[in-house]
Image (cartoon, rainbow, N blue to C red):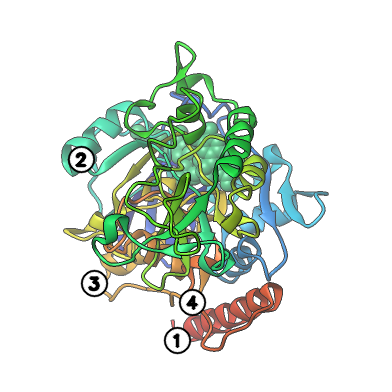
Amino acid sequence: MGHILVVGAGLAGSEAAWAAANAGAHVTLIEMKPHKYTAAHHSPGFAELVCSNSFKAKRQDSAAGLLKQELKLMSSVCMQAAQSCEVAAGGALAVDREIFSKTVTRLIKSHSRIKIEHREITDVSELQGDAVIIATGPLTSAPLASNLKSILGKSLSFYDAAAPIVAADSVDSELSFCASRYGKDGSDYVNCPMDKLQYEAFYQALITAETVPLHEFEVEDGLVRFYEGCIPIEALAKRGKDAIRFGPMKPVGLTDPRTGHRPWAVLQLRRENAEGTMLNLVGFQTNLKFGEQKRVFRMIPALQKAEFFRYGVMHRNTFIDSPRLLNPSFALKDNSRIFFAGQITGVEGYMESASSGIIAGINAVREARQQAPFILPRQTMMGALAAYISDDSVKGFQPMGANFGIIPPLEQQVRDKKERHAMLSHRAINLLKQKLVQF
Ligand SMILES: Cc1cc2nc3c(=O)[nH]c(=O)nc-3n(C[C@H](O)[C@H](O)[C@H](O)COP(=O)(O)OP(=O)(O)OC[C@H]3O[C@@H](n4cnc5c(N)ncnc54)[C@H](O)[C@@H]3O)c2cc1C
């Protein structure tokens, strides 16, 4: 039957324990609360929502909505709880956070195959079981984080510094051009040029845009602790009018074919996935509010109609270098008995964490039974997230939430975005259902 140890009873750990126990394993779920709390957790229950009480859009033709549909099909304990304590929030699924956490806690505690232990794990080697799942989240306690660092080496990050990602087909090809600096190494970058007036308007908007308030534990002497090698674009801009024009937006080595001249400033976009459907705004890691990112970055002419797959974020976040370390089953590539789940794997968001917990939970049991891993098709949102975090062609890995850019495109081109998303969702749900029938 197997004995599975799950560390951390957050969104991912609760799901992992639930999925493993439902698959017939005996599970010990180890949670350090209430003896010790992270800086963001305050209540003793499981699956505590540390910030927003929303699980985002419900519409199945949205990325977040599709993920929730898939979670439901996978018997997610978080979805079961969420539906019992939904609060009115327009098209979003929002919950009463206290009832949500209490419901997940009650369901987990009443499962006959789940045993709970309240203690802090500080050393992974003390965990004896047929398989182990580490789901200690973005604020993994410091002793465990340093233990993981000693095991995984440089492959552990303590903060996000992610730049936004836009849909390649939403970038205006008339107002951008493909080239690499000095014509070297092909024409891998999509360059978004600006003239002096455009740059000055953009610059003013950037330095006056609203930023996300930081949490106490992220700040030291009024500055974000992690500023050194990854300064947000707006903070760099505030150092002087030309700071970003000599930095990430430098135009050197580039000639705009429309004018035959070097632009005043350039934003470069780089491929984020092999298909080239997602483009990363190079050097634009940012702490601006999401609405402000859309408003300000769309002032760059080629991005006037940009569709954002992911907004930039900068916050305290412990996560491992999953593409180098994990399989899509969420097991370590070099130790199939040890799994990771949740935000620590580089998925971003409550439901994304829940999703990885389910896959890790199922696969931990399969590992204990020496069965082949359960891998979902990449066309599903859950499968796409698992594929993304374990794809070692990804460079400069940064956390990723559900979005349609990580799903392989449809075979036919569908111009209308709503229709395209509806078709992608339809395909995902059908494939997931087929997979579950075979499972
Ligand atoms: C401040 C903050 C705000 C966020 N806001 C949002 C948001 O609004 N919306 C959103 O979608 N996502 C948000 N996230 C991102 C993320 O989705 C959530 O953090 C989510 O809770 C991650 O789920 P998880 O299961 O991986 O980790 P968590 O839910 O954090 O669960 C980890 C659990 O492990 C326990 N633990 C930690 N270390 C140990 C140890 N050594 N031994 C035993 N137990 C341990 C913790 O006490 C905790 O219960 C936020 C993250 C942070 C840090």
Inspect the image, locate mark 3, and give the three-letter code of the amino acid beneath it: Gln
Q: Residue at x 68, y 47 (%)?
A: 54
Q: Secondary structure at mark 3?
A: loop
Residue 32: % across, % down: 42, 31
Nearest the eye: 87 or 304? 304
Per the model, the C-alpha gap separating discs 1 and 4 is 17 Å
Disc 3 and disc 1: Cα gap in Å? 18 Å
In this picture, residue 174 sits left or right of residue 7: right
Check contact, mark 3 vs mark 2: CB within 8 A. Answer: no
What residue is disc 1 on? Answer: 438
Residue under label 3, please give it: 370
| Other residues around mark 2 within 10 Å, as few (<14) / some (14–19) / many (≥20) | few
Distance from disc 3 to disc 2, alpha carbons, whole Å, reads 31 Å
Q: Quadrant for residue 275, please give it.
A: bottom left
- Label 4 Cα neighbours within 10 Å, binned few <14 / some 14-19 / many ≥20: many
Q: Are marks 1 and 4 in contact (CB under 8 Å)?
A: no
Q: Position of residue 226 (x, y in %)?
A: 38, 27
| Circle 2 or circle 1, nearest the eye | 2
Q: Is residue 89 above or below residue 214?
A: below
Q: Label 4, on which residue? A: 379
Quarter placement of the N terminus = bottom left
Judge depth for marks 3 and 4 and give the one in front.
Answer: 4
Q: Amino acid at mark 1?
A: Gln
Q: Are marks 3 and 4 in contact (CB under 8 Å)?
A: no
Tag 2: amino acid? Lys
Q: Are marks 2 and 1 in contact (CB under 8 Å)?
A: no
- Looking at the image, is mark 3 or mark 1 earlier in the sequence? 3
The residue indicated by pointer 2 is 154
Residue at image coords 60%, 31% = 212
Choose between 102 and 295: the one closer to the eye: 295
**Up/down of 197 relative to 396, above or below:** above
Residue 118 in sight here = no
